[in-house]
Image (cartoon, helix red, strand yellow):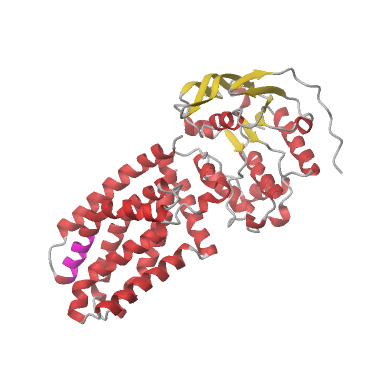
């Protein structure tokens, strides 16, 4: 899925010696993380362990104060705008505007990047996430699950190298979870890298992934669990 | 880059037309201020001509404050501001988009209140409408430029409207004085050029510094 895969380095994320603090509180302590093309890293950890902070750093929303972060070989400290063009972040908030329709929301997202999708492509992306029937309705009245689907449609549009997800299964029903996992598997197969924070190992189990534990700001890899095939959705 | 700024402005203006939120509040507020001034002073034609620059600028200032109080309101919805900051455009472009949207709404209100002021105060300055509008545009560019930055700064504050007014009034005082003097010059045949020059200087300073300051402000 991501274009120019061959021209880009194998490591999508290369995070070295990253520390982060809020005031006096040290939230991340010497994080080293490498994510290669097609890999999915899942961050587990209790509340306040630093998962969301790590995702915010990976999204470049938080400035890096100590350590280095290369995304697709780009130094994110110096090339933040270019780096942001290569990732999509879907967190607790969907970053959608309620007064805009799904098509308009996606058009707005595309215009703030180096994307120029046609109207047909925008509608196709909306249809792919199962929202074709409400493509021209303001998204204000959408359910949380519909909003999440629409937020994920950005991934289909942008073809990013890196997809960052914070609790992606929240607000999704069983069918939505199966749909999301199928989409993520396809994304991985096409060379995309995923980093997600989750409290839900059962739902993640359908993905080929590398679990990592984050405890009081320290990241440690855990042995990969056996992959569980999800039953096909009806 | 320009497409991104235009798109942010379009989103704000289109959103406002759909929700009928900021524009109607600004217009209603402007009309109320003008009616109160008219009732309080009851000026004759000559007196009204003398008061007109101050009245127009006071109304513009108050109206701008109403608009600025809401300039980042849409961005509070579902973490939209964070989404904006994740865009692959420089922070300055985001600022320009927000500023442009606010500027367009404010100018629209000014376009509507100018004829209303003339009718309400019974002053015949229709021939100078172009020049008056020009001065208003020059002043509004700087006023909304600095105002957008201050609105971003006070976005998270509990009493942000009060804070915004407290910060904006002293910082834009030179701009407002230049605007009033330039307009008075047009209406009474006095000096105009030095005041216009001052307005342009303030506009350039504000618009050169504010995008940079915005980028610094939103960095975490």
- Residue A149, compared with residue A23, is above or below; it is below
In the figure, is residue A136 to the left or right of B126? right
Residue A10 visible here = no
Residue A183, horizontal then vertical, whole percent = 73, 36
Q: Seen in the image, is B102 located left or right of residue B142?
A: right
Expressed as whole percent of the image width and height from the top left, the position of residue B141 reads 32, 55
The residue segment tinted magenta is B179-187
| Rendering quarter of residue A135 | bottom right
Most common secondary structure along the magenta stretch: helix
Which quadrant would residue A31 be assigned to in this image?
top right
Assign the N terminus of chain A to one quadrant of the image: top right
At x 66%, y 29%, the residue is: A46
Question: Is residue B32 located in the magenta-colored stretch of the structure?
Answer: no
**Which one is nearer the viewer's eye here, A198 or B91?**
A198
Residue drawn at x 34%, y 55% is: B165
Q: From the viewer's perspective, tell me whether residue A159 is left or right of residue B4.
A: right
| Residue that sits furthest to the left in the current view | B190
Residue A29's spot in the image, x, y percent?
54, 20
Using the rendered view, name the quadrant where residue A223 is placed. top right
């Amino acid at each position: 899925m991501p274009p120019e895969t061959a021209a880009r380095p194998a490591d999508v994320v290369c995070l070295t010696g990253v520390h982060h603090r809020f005031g006096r509180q040290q939230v991340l302590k010497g994080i080293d993380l490498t994510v290669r093309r097609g890999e999915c890293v899942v961050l587990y950890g209790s509340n306040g362990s630093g998962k969301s902070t790590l995702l915010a750093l990976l999204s470049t929303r938080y400035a890096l104060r100590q350590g280095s972060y290369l995304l697709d070989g780009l130094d994110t400290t110096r090339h933040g705008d270019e780096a942001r063009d290569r990732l999509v972040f879907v967190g607790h908030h969907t970053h959608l505007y309620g007064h805009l329709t799904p098509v308009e929301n996606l058009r707005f997202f595309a215009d703030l990047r180096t994307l120029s999708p046609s109207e047909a492509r925008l509608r196709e992306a909306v249809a792919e996430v199962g929202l074709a029937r409400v493509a021209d309705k303001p998204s204000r009245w959408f359910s949380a699950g519909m909003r999440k689907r629409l937020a994920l449609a950005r991934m289909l549009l942008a073809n990013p190298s890196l997809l960052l997800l914070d609790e992606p299964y929240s607000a999704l029903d069983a069918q939505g979870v199966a749909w999301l996992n199928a989409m993520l598997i396809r994304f991985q197969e096409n060379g995309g890298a995923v980093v997600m924070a989750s409290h839900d190992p059962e739902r993640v189990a359908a993905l080929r992934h590398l679990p990592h534990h984050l405890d009081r700001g320290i990241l440690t890899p855990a042995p990969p669990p056996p992959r569980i095939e999800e039953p096909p959705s009806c | 880059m320009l497409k991104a700024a235009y798109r942010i402005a379009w989103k704000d203006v289109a959103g406002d037309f759909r929700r009928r939120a900021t524009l109607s509040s600004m217009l209603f507020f402007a009309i109320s201020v003008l009616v109160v001034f008219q009732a309080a002073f009851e000026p004759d034609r000559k007196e009204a001509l003398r008061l007109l620059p101050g009245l127009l600028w006071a109304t513009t200032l108050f109206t701008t404050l109403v608009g600025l109080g809401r300039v980042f309101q849409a961005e509070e919805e579902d973490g939209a501001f964070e989404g904006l900051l994740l865009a692959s455009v420089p922070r300055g472009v985001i600022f320009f988009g927000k500023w442009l949207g606010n500027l367009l709404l404010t100018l629209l209100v000014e376009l509507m209140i100018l004829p209303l002021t003339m009718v309400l105060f019974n002053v015949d300055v229709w021939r100078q409408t172009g020049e008056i509008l020009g001065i208003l545009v020059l002043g509004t560019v700087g006023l909304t430029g600095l105002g957008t930055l201050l609105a971003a700064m006070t976005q998270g504050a509990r009493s942000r409207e009060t804070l915004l007014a407290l910060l904006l009034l002293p910082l834009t005082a030179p701009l407002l004085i230049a605007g009033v003097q330039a307009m008075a010059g047009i209406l009474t045949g006095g000096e105009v050029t030095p005041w216009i020059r001052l307005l342009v200087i303030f506009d350039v300073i504000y618009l050169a510094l504010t995008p940079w300051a915005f980028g610094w402000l939103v960095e975490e």
